Image (cartoon, rainbow, N blue to C red):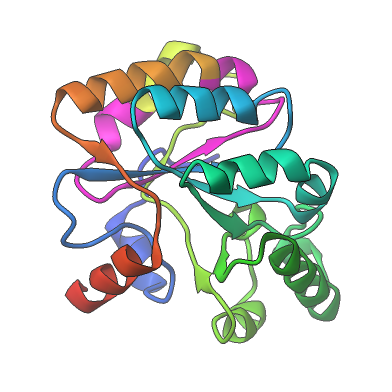
Amino acid sequence: MYLAKTPNVIKNLFPNFIWQMNDCGKQLFLTFDDGPIPEVTPWILSVLKEYQAKATFFCVGDNVERHGDIHQQILDEGHVVGSHTFNHLSGWQTENRSYFRNVLRGAASTDSGLFRPPYGRIKPSQLSYLRKHFRIVMWDVLSGDFDASISDEQCLQNVLQNSTNGSIIVMHDSLKARKKVKYVLPRMLDHFSSAGFSFSALTEDLLQRSEQAA
């Protein structure tokens, strides 16, 4: 069970997470979790380049170490990288000390101060530690590209119907999501570009501006 649009009540319960960007006009913030992998990530990069769109990739450290050339391509093409642990661990199912070690190892691989917990799951005791070291980025819109029970078109509508100024949108550069991503990404980029939106990465400057406007 998941929600395509994160309710305000959840955002208000967890104000220390970054859910969306403030005071940014007609900008959307695409994010991709779980890569980089050769079967999906280079294709995503080519589509983003076609639309002059920038994104943020929350990378699994093990994938970064195995596919360092793709990780470097992400950076060379002007995108931002964040950490998604080293082995895609769920904080709910992992003892704190082991989880922290895995998070820090993933962050070392990506050399990033941005962190997104896999599945969006961390314990309160983990949060208090992680906040000292990272900006923790969640999302405003969840595409559902990982969900085999929904159609490609429903996945697209999850994004089109729920994204507004400043939305942080989650997609995945993973094998599980590949079919839906290939359907959704060019269509949503075309739709929002035609409506006057731009697609930006979560840069330090934009994050600072958003925090000041909150």
Residue in view at x 73 percent, y 28 percent: 38
Inspect the magenta stretch and tell me whether residue 166 lies in it.
yes
Which of 175/113 is in front?
Answer: 113
Q: Relative to residue 38, is residue 33 drawn left or right?
A: left
**Residue 23 x, y percent position in the rendering:** 16, 61
Above or below: residue 103 compared with residue 181: below
The quadrant of the image that shows the N terminus is top right
Q: Relative to residue 180, is residue 83 drawn left or right?
A: right
**Residue 72 x, y percent position in the rendering:** 65, 46
Residue in view at x 68 percent, y 60 percent: 110
Which image quadrant is residue 74 in?
A: top right
Inspect the magenta stretch and tell me whether residue 113 lies in it.
no
Which of 104/88 is in front?
Answer: 104
**Residue 161 x, y percent position in the rendering:** 26, 29
**Residue 15 x, y percent position in the rendering:** 37, 74
Above or below: residue 57 compared with residue 113: above
Q: Which residues are the magenta region?
A: 159-181
